[in-house]
């Protein structure tokens, strides 16, 4: 094995992070300058922008921050919002035909139907915004999160330079410079878990540097990770639990809290779920018995205390701040935060024997190093056969920024990996193809899921093949088209998806859908197609009473979710067999494995089958499901 040059390795990662940041800034600049706002009556409904907007009421939130409601028209708005709580946002207005950015830094607090609530720095900012909105149309767009890029760059520098003996050993293992080591421990028993889950926990306890819980869809990865954390806390006073996103941190933190574990959630409260606010650092700080005295001291200092009194009060203020902070961390069994959040000032000089990283296969490696610097060993949970982290820069992606640390460790040290093999989500026929292609055929369907069906008259797998219809020259609408935003749509396929969903619900019966709460997901790789399908659904009176049972989204948006019935619109339809990023088979793995009882694929098998994966998938469905050919005559499809 070739020994990695540490300086070269970390320097290269820093270069890739810089490329990604440059691409982020360039996209922001381009999107801002090229919006074409000088056109009279322009309306922008993009994932990262709303224009024009109406400013609503201001109020103070539970944390004492000033908030402002921003309203926008939702008519014909089918875009997938990327506005999420905690993200930076910027107001702008149209001035002499050009968009002008306003200086007020704000953050998204809440997102609702036609409403985005943002936090503002002060009342002056709110007044300035209202004054500007009185003179010009005003808009809101997402800003750039500079913090993440700064944290990742600094973490890579620190990881390279650290000479701490225990960290150096861990670093060498993660870089492949020395093999991982394991200690021998008595077997632990968890009768409520399956054997592969128990073995994963055993490996976690025995690992001295690194272990990986590889959890394919539906195999109970979070359940296993929670049990591993609780069992580790039998041996250690406190652990650090991280994930790449706030939603993932909140989810695992909530599971731990339900098991009675004292969790201290560190991070921006705006980015936390409502359930997690009570265990946030800020709420726990304000609830501390000494906080009332601290608040009183600060009030006196604000009112102008001087001389010896001010000196004594500031000394006492510092003492109380240190004491409250120490108490909060000492009481916590689990400290949870995002990977980037592990670098917050509150976390300075904090060290943990064990770091758990959930959803590690979706985490950029530089972000992982920020948290790893605080630990002696690391346990990663995730599935590198599902979607990787998003990398916007093509140069950074080609350079390997999307290759995760978990992925690298799996390749380097298979002895540190435990695959969970029993899945509890999918019918065995839906599971069997992903199992064979991505997991070496090692997955088994749990008895309660193996034969689960929506209807006993149904089959779990169907592919509606449009290739015969598409090849007919009079039906050219059955082809992909690029939208203004660069995404792809296939209008006739979108209509066929709606028709297919209608027929399936009729077969099952709307009454059964309502009474048994059967839910449906329509998944497509392309945002343009998702927008089109949503629009078509809204136009159909039939679906109005059923809309709470139906979700439409992209593959990326559906990762981590599941539905009883999944319909996949693959969009690609061309004579050349060009399938774009559908070549990243992890995308298809995610899409297929969202289905519990029924999977329907809609697409041109001739176009897709140029690729051996889709050719094998079509053959699998012919053998174990139903391959339906859409006829060019417009007659009913035939199996």
Image (tube, grey):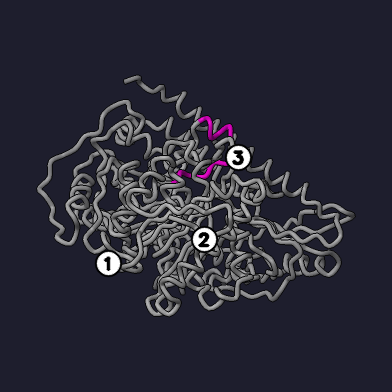
Indicate which disc residue 182 carries. none
Question: Foreground: 15 or 74?
Answer: 74
Q: Is residue 96 left or right of residue 307?
A: right
Return the x and y of residue 184 as percentages of the image width and height: 12, 41
Residue beneath disc 2: 636
596 in relation to 299, above or below: above
Image side of residue 46 versus residue 460, left or right: right
Q: Magenta residues?
A: 387-399
For this orientation, the residue located farthest to the top is 2
Q: Indicate left or right for 183 with 1 as reference.
A: left
Q: Position of residue 623 (x, y in %)?
A: 33, 48
SS of the residue at dot 1? loop
Q: Residue at x 56, y 39 (%)?
A: 580
Whole-angstrom CA distance, mark 1 to mark 2, is 54 Å
Q: Which residue is mark 3?
A: 21
- Disc 1, disc 2: CB below 8 Å? no
Residue 562, image x, y percentages: 40, 61
- Which quadrant would residue 140 be assigned to in this image? bottom right
Give the secondary structure at mark 2.
loop
In reply to whether residue 200 is colored magenta, the answer given is no
Please state if 572 lies on the left or on the right of 259 as rendered.
right
Q: Residue at x 51, y 71 (%)?
A: 295
State the mark number for residue 259: 1
Quarter of the picture holding the C terminus: bottom left
Q: Earlier in the sequence, mark 3 or mark 2?
A: 3
In this orientation, does residue 246 appear? yes
Label whose residue precedes the other's in the sequence (1 or 3): 3
Q: Which quadrant would the N terminus be assigned to in this image?
A: top left
Outermost residue to the right: 96
Badge 1: residue crowd in 10 Å (few <14, some 14–19, many ≥20): few
């Amino acid at each position: 094995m070739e020994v990695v040059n540490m300086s070269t390795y970390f320097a290269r990662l820093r270069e890739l992070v810089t490329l990604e940041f440059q691409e982020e800034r360039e996209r922001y600049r381009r999107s801002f300058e090229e919006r074409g706002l000088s056109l009279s009556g322009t309306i922008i409904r993009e994932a990262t922008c709303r224009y024009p907007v109406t400013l609503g009421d201001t109020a103070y939130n539970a944390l004492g921050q000033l908030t402002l409601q921003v309203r926008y028209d939702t008519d014909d708005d089918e875009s997938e919002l990327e506005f999420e709580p905690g993200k930076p946002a910027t107001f702008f207005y149209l001035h002499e035909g050009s968009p002008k950015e306003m200086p007020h830094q704000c953050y998204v607090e809440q997102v609702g139907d036609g409403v985005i609530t943002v936090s503002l720095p002060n009342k002056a900012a709110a007044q300035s915004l209202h004054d500007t909105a009185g003179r010009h149309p005003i808009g809101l767009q997402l800003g750039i999160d500079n913090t993440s890029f700064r944290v990742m760059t600094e973490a890579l520098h620190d990881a390279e330079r650290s000479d701490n003996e225990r960290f150096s050993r861990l670093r060498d293992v993660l870089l492949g410079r020395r093999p991982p080591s394991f200690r021998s421990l008595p077997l632990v028993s968890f009768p409520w878990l399956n054997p592969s889950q128990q073995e994963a926990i055993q490996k976690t306890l025995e690992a001295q540097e690194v272990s990986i819980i590889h959890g394919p869809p539906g195999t109970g990865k979070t359940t296993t990770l929670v049990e591993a954390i609780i069992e580790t806390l039998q041996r250690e006073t406190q652990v650090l639990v991280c994930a790449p996103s706030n939603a993932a941190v909140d989810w695992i933190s909530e599971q731990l809290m339900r098991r009675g574990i004292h969790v201290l959630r560190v991070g921006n409260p705006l980015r936390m779920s409502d359930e997690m606010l009570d265990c946030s650092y800020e709420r726990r700080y304000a609830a501390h018995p000494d906080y009332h005295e601290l608040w009183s001291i600060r009030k006196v200092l604000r009112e102008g205390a001087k001389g010896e009194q001010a000196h004594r009060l500031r000394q006492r203020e510092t003492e109380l701040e240190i004491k409250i902070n120490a108490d909060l961390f000492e009481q916590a069994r689990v400290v949870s935060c995002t990977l980037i959040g592990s670098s917050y000032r509150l976390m300075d000089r904090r060290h943990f024997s064990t770091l758990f990283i959930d959803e590690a296969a979706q985490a950029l490696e530089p972000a992982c190093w920020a948290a790893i610097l605080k630990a002696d060993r690391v346990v990663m949970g995730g599935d590198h056969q599902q979607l990787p982290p998003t990398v916007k820069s093509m140069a950074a992606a080609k350079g390997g920024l999307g290759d995760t640390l978990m992925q690298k460790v799996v390749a380097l040290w298979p002895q540190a990996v435990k695959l969970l093999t029993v899945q509890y989500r999918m019918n065995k026929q839906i599971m069997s193809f992903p199992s064979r292609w991505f997991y070496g055929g090692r997955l088994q369907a749990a008895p309660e899921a193996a034969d689960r069906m929506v209807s006993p008259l149904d089959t779990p797998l169907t592919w509606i093949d449009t290739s015969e219809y598409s090849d007919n020259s009079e039906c050219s609408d059955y082809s992909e088209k690029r939208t203004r935003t660069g995404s792809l749509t296939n209008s006739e396929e979108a209509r066929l998806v709606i028709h297919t969903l209608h027929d399936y619900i009729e077969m099952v019966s709307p009454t059964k859908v309502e009474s048994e709460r059967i839910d449906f997901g329509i998944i497509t790789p392309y945002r343009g197609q998702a927008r089109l399908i949503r629009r078509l659904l809204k136009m159909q009176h039939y679906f109005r009473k059923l809309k709470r049972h139906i979700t439409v989204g992209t593959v990326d948006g559906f990762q981590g979710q599941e539905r009883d019935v999944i319909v996949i619109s693959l969009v690609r339809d061309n004579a050349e067999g060009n399938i774009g990023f559908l070549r990243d088979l992890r995308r298809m793995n995610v899409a297929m494995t969202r289905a519990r009882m029924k999977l329907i694929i809609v697409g041109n098998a001739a176009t897709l089958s140029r690729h051996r994966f889709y050719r094998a998938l079509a053959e699998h469905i012919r053998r174990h499901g139903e391959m339906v050919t859409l006829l060019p005559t417009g007659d009913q499809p035939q199996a």
